[in-house]
Each structure stands twice: as structure tokens, then as C-alpha cells.
Amino acid sequence: MTLPDTIAPFTFLDPKVGAFTLRPLKLPDDMALIHGWLSQQRARFWAMEKLSISELCDFYQQLKSSGKGGGFIGEHQGKAVMLIECYDPAQDPVGEHYAVAPGDLGMHILLAPAKTPIRGFSRAAFNATLHFCFDGVGASRVVVEPDTRNQAIHRLNRQAGFVYERQITLPDKIAELAFCTAEQFAKAQQPTPHRSLAVAAHLTPARWQQVNRHLVRKMLAELCHEKVFIPKALGDGVYSVAADDGQSLYRFTAKITALDHWLIAADSIECWQHQQCQPIDAASLVLACQQQLKIKPAMLGTYLEEIAATLYSAAYKAEHQQYSSAELVDVDFQTIERAMTEGHPCFIANNGRIGFDALDFPAYAPEAGQPVRLIWLAAHKDDSVFATSRDLDYRRLLLSELGEGQLNDFEASISQKGFNPAHYYLMPVHPWQWFNKLVYLFAKPLATGRLICLGEGLDCYQAQQSIRTFFNRDKPENCYVKTALSILNMGFMRGLSPYYMSTTPAINDFVYDLVNQDPYLAETGFSILREVAGVGYMHPDFETTLDKHSPYRKMLSGLWRESPLPSLNPGQKLMSMTALLHQDNDGKALLVALIRASGLDTRQWLRRYLKAYLSPLLHCFYAHDLVFMPHGENLILVMENQVPVRAIMKDIAEEIAILNTEVVLSEQVKRLAVAVPDDYKVLSILTDVFDCFFRFIGAILEEQADVSEGVFWALVAECVLQYQDAHPALAEKFKKHDLFAPQFTLSCLNRLQLANNQQMVDLADPAGSLQFAGVLNNPIAPFAREKEATAPKMAQA
């Protein structure tokens, strides 16, 4: 909106802080004062510190005379305390990033430095400014575009009711685009419930029934898939599962698709006990079917806790879901990251996070999307390991990650405590880990100066889907930071081994060279995000007495992983591949929304996706015996016009292997070579890709897209055949590890977790821990070479 020619002084009375008066700037009388404010470091996000007083005067005179906006002073008790700018978004670069509506008003605010801070003053001043925008100027919606690094203003914005939509790139900054209507502002002014009430606000009867029905649907589907349950067919697509308690019977309608995937209609699920229909409840299903699940009594309590935590998380996600799948198509990388709701598609109890309390959840869970400042420690080199990639060193890494000023401050803090900074490595720590584990378990090294706490870092991070990995929101091109986190989640304590940290950069360099030097991988655009540095501290008491796999030896380590942003070309954006399985509260799939938004035919879109994702995985396996853990959270897709153009693999050192013990590897890299029976090797594709990811894509397409799952599997087969045709020299390997075998062994993830939810895999023998249950019919078997003439026909079906 264009500002009125004349705006009268506006007064707002805050009941606690007192009256504020907002008036137009007086030119040139106010300029010396404003110049002093804008020249300070705290005003750096305004980027006006180099302007002289006369230049500032000219700027605000031009802003008003052009009709684009105006400047205002806010006074408190007769003293100037803030600078406000209001402007017309239609005449500003921000207007190029969204559809400007009538009544939209842009706003900037700068609070003056205060010699004697007043409790609640900043929020009161901000509220006075918004009352001025709505009631004094007449705006219907206020638009802001603060610098992504300006955490102070983000807090004020959110407290006032602003809804953050996405990141945008403006000429002078990367900004957060956010909006607030008068209604949203008024709602935000209502009293905030005490935190004891807030942590349970999403637990309403309707929401609880919704998430239980969703999880029971998944439980029935995955446990039928893993042949834990053997349903009885009742006709017309209706099935029943009888519980081993002899009292409960579950009935539902389902369609069985490829790979024994059970497409169960959630609304059809009924639980009957003594001929009475009971509410759908996930914990009740576990208890009724305990014998069928083969869960030991010692494990039952932990599993029920994981189920309860998964339901709590699901209710929170559903209650706070801001975007439909159609809307997610256009948002930025980190908005998609925190919008994901499902977790691992196969695991039932996939959000256990045992160790987090109700206040930790909204602070650190990825779906909360809250800014997190990491704690920094100094670890004595005699007790620590530190390693970097060959093109990096300790000093360069820390200068890049911390900046010279913060690094100098940390080292000065070490010196002030009477120690030599040269004898220490700096390392980042998850705040939860510091407060809940390290401060007392590592009390001895802290008391003796072998560990030194340096306090919070300056940068704000955001938790990723993997929960212990953080994206730098203030400096998005800086490294991710992965930290040890001693919570139990999906069958493991999420620690990090100092031993692994010592070899992680070398392993990443090895894989990076292998990938970059391969012409075919270069053709597909496949790349990895290197973990360029690792650091770990070894507690002397734990290191010498406990088993090397003990979680107590994995409590204090961290690593730095490259950011994918510097590798993007103009017009490209990023998306975690797990988003392809996301469905919103209405059940609408993001995958289908992406395909529709791309303008491509569904088959064309899927072919491009398979070329970007499946083809490089095939090549790594067949040409290099190299396998990854290629599930959705470990893959980042590079998108152009909503179409995947290449894939980026992450989480390299902990989750890759070379399935060839005869390959010659250096000492630092040799742990990659893993002895696996030949029959198991091809499961790295058939299980990890086909059964644990493609199965769910096929189901989404079957339910919501304009092609059937049969077409999808035909396209998968087509992709495999095209790869094989392009690499005839690997024909013997294709035959030995046959992706077109009629059947393959069913490897069961939930059986694995149910057998031991404390540590579901023996780290000394991972392959020996696997749980198998019969076989699955291979959905691409009909397209084997001798039948390839039928493939094009089916792909067009």
C-alpha cells in the first residue's frame, strides 16, 4: 500500500512498559541521532553504517517524496527509542518474490541501544509498531524480510504472530519472507499458556484418534509385509488379523500391491473385542499381539515408550502443519526439512527419541524448526583425536566456521583460565548433550582442565531429519555440524565414535575421488557431501574399561559436513529425498504435487528421477562394489523446475561399505571393506532401494497419480536395462548379482527392532544381525532380458 501523505502521531499504551508515541521523522533534525544508531555494530543488518548524516537525510527525503514509504521515530517517555521504516512492497524488490495484495505494508524496525534495559521493552516496542501499522497507517497485512542471520528480530516477529513462508534472495541479503495480518497479531497478543499446558496442547481427543489410526494403519501394513501377521481374507478386499490375546480382532480393507505392500484404507480399520468395536489404539495393538511380535518382556516397556513418543510427535506435527503438499512445492530447502511428518517409512516406532523431555522436543526436534546455538568445548589434545580432509587444516576450518573474532574470543577464554590454547581442539556440542550428559559424566576432565566449556557459539543452526545433524541458518554455505546425542532412537543410542572421527575425512576423500573420477557418475551428476573434519574426546575412565561399542565411549564427538548450497547452479533448489514420500494432513502427496507443478508427463518425471538416483547407485554397486544407505533422509535431490536433475549422497563414513574384502585399501580406509555373503550383496539395491523406498513411491502413484504402480516398476526396469546396455563389460556381475531374479529374500526392519530395541544390530557383525522372513516377488522380474520386448508396452500402460 502507498502511505498517506500525512500520518498523525500515534500513541500506544503498553500496560507494563508505558506509552509509546510514533511520529514521522523530522528532517534534518533527527538525522544525527539516527546516524549514531545506524553506525553501531548492532545495526549491521540495515547496511547503512557507511552513510553520512547528509546522505541519510537525502535517503529518507527521497523515500517520502517518491511515494515508496516513509521513516518514523518511536518515543518512550519523551525519549527517541526506535526507528521504523514503512514502505510499499509493490515498489520494493521484495514485491518480486510474492503476489502483493492490496493493504500490504512493508516494515523495518531498529531499537536504539539502552543503557538500562527494561524487562519486556523490546516486545512492547515491537507491539506498539504493529499497532501503528494496522491502526495508524491502515495496513491489512504487514510484510517483513529480515536477514536470515538476525535471530533477535526473528524472535520478535514470531512472538507478534508473523508466519514465516520461505527464504528469498534480495540484492543485499538472504532474507526470510514473513507475513502478519491484524487477526494473527491480535491472536498472538493473547496470554501464552504456561509451558506445563503448552507441551500438551496438541493432545486433543480428535488429534489423538487421528494419529493412532494412522500409526495402526502403518503397523498393520508393515507387519503384514514382514509376515509377522498373516491376515485372513474375508472377501471383497476385507481382511482380519486375530491378536494372540484371544480377545482382539482387527478388520480392514486393503489392496496388496507389488512387494507385498498393503495399501490399507485407514478409515476401514476396526478393532473388535468381545464383539464390541473399540477405539483404535496403537499401544493396545502391541499389547494384544505381544507373542506374535516376539518382543521380550525386558524390551516391551522401551518399545511402548517409543510408540508413545512417535504418537506424541505425530500429533505435534499434525497440529502445527503449516503447508499443504501443493504449497510445499515452492518453499525453500529448510522449510521442507522441518515440514516432514512420517520419519522412516518402514520402521513403526521411528520417533522414539528416548531421553528428550517435553521441553526438549519443541527446542530440538526437526519438526519444531527452532534455532539452536551449539555449545563449544576445548578438548585437550592428549585425550582427543582430530582429522581433516587433505585440502583442509584445523585453523582454516575453525576460521571458516567461527570467524576470526569468535575464534580469538574462545582462545582468549582458554588463556584466561590459565591454559595454553595451542594444547586444545575446539569442538561443538549439542546443548542437550551438554546439560544432560557431559556436564556430570565428564565432570572430572572439566574440573581438571582437560575439558573447558567456552559457552554458546554465535551462529544459529536448525536440526535436520537425522536429529543430531544441524544446518547453519546464519551461514547456509558453511558446514553442517553432526554431534553426538545420547538419546535412544530407532534401535540405537545416537552417539559418535572418536575412532570413526579419526578416519572419517580420509574415507570421505577416498569416496570423493572415486566418485569424481568416474565418467559415468559425472554424467549422472551424482556427488557426495564430504565430511571434511572430525573431532572426538576420549574419556580416560570409559576408554580403558568399556567395550569399544559402548555408548559411553561415543558421547563426545562431532564432525563437519560440506553444505550442498555452493554446488547449485542458478535456478536450482534442494530437497531431501524423504520429501517424495510426504503426505499432508489431507493425505495429499508432495510427489504428485511436484510432478504436476513440473509440467512434465508423469513418466518423463519418473525417468528423470530414476536417472538421477537409481542409475548412480547401480554403477557404484556394480563397478565399484560400493554401497550406501540410500534411504530418503540420506539423499538430497537437486531440483530444477520441480524436477530432480541430480542426487547428492550424505552421511558417508558411517553408512557406506565396499562389499569386497580383496580390494587393497589404505590403513585409514580399510574399515570400508566388509565381508558379506554373495547372496546378500544385491540386497543393497533390492532391499534398501526397492523394498524400503520404491515400494512406497509405487503405492503413492497407485493411489494418487495418473499412472499405476505397474508403470513405475516398468520404468525402474527400463532404467536398469539402460544401465546394463551402457556397461556390457559388467555383464558377469549383472548375472551374478541379478536384479531381475524372480524373487529375493525379505529383510525385515521391524523384526530387527522388535528383537532388540536397545541396539538392533551387532556392530561387530552387522550382516549377521539381519532378520529374514521368506521371499518377495521381484516387481521388475517380468522385464528380464528375455522378456524385454514386453517392457515398452507395459511402460506405456
Image (cartoon, grey):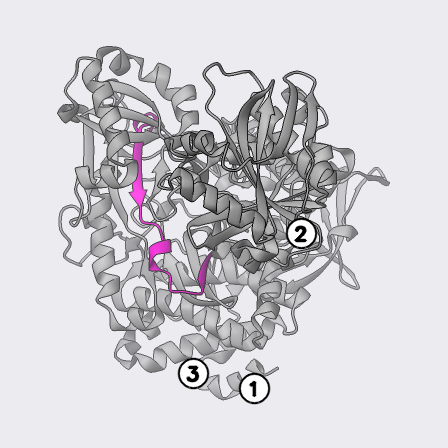
Q: Which amino acid type corresponds to the residue marked 1 in the rendered image?
A: Lys
Residue most extreme to the right: 276
Q: Where does residue 402 sit, x and y in percent of width and height? A: 29, 35
Q: Nearer the viewer, mark 2 or mark 1?
A: 2
Q: Is residue 547 above or below residue 394?
A: above
Bounds of the magenta span?
552-574
Q: Which of the two residues, 298 or 420, is positioned nearer the viewer here? A: 420
Tag on residue 393?
A: none
Q: Which amino acid type corresponds to the residue marked 2 in the rendered image?
A: Met
Tag on residue 785?
A: 3
The residue where tag 1 is placed is 793
Q: Where does residue 714 sit, x and y in percent of width and height? A: 53, 76
SS under mark 2: loop
Q: Is residue 149 above or below residue 545?
A: below
Mark 1 nearby-residue class (10 Å; few <14, some 14–19, many ≥20) = few
SS under mark 3: helix
Task: Kindly tell me whether residue 357 is visible in this rendering.
Answer: no
Residue most extreme to the front: 28
Residue 637 in magenta stretch: no
Q: Where does residue 409 sit, x and y in percent of width and height? A: 26, 25
Q: Where does residue 290 sit, x and y in percent of width and height? A: 62, 36
Is residue 27 found left or right of 323 in the rendered image? Answer: left
Q: Is residue 373 above or below residue 721?
A: above
Mark 2 nearby-residue class (10 Å; few <14, some 14–19, many ≥20) = many
Q: Which amino acid type corresponds to the residue marked 3 in the rendered image?
A: Arg
Quadrant where the image shows the C terminus: bottom right
The residue where tag 2 is placed is 1
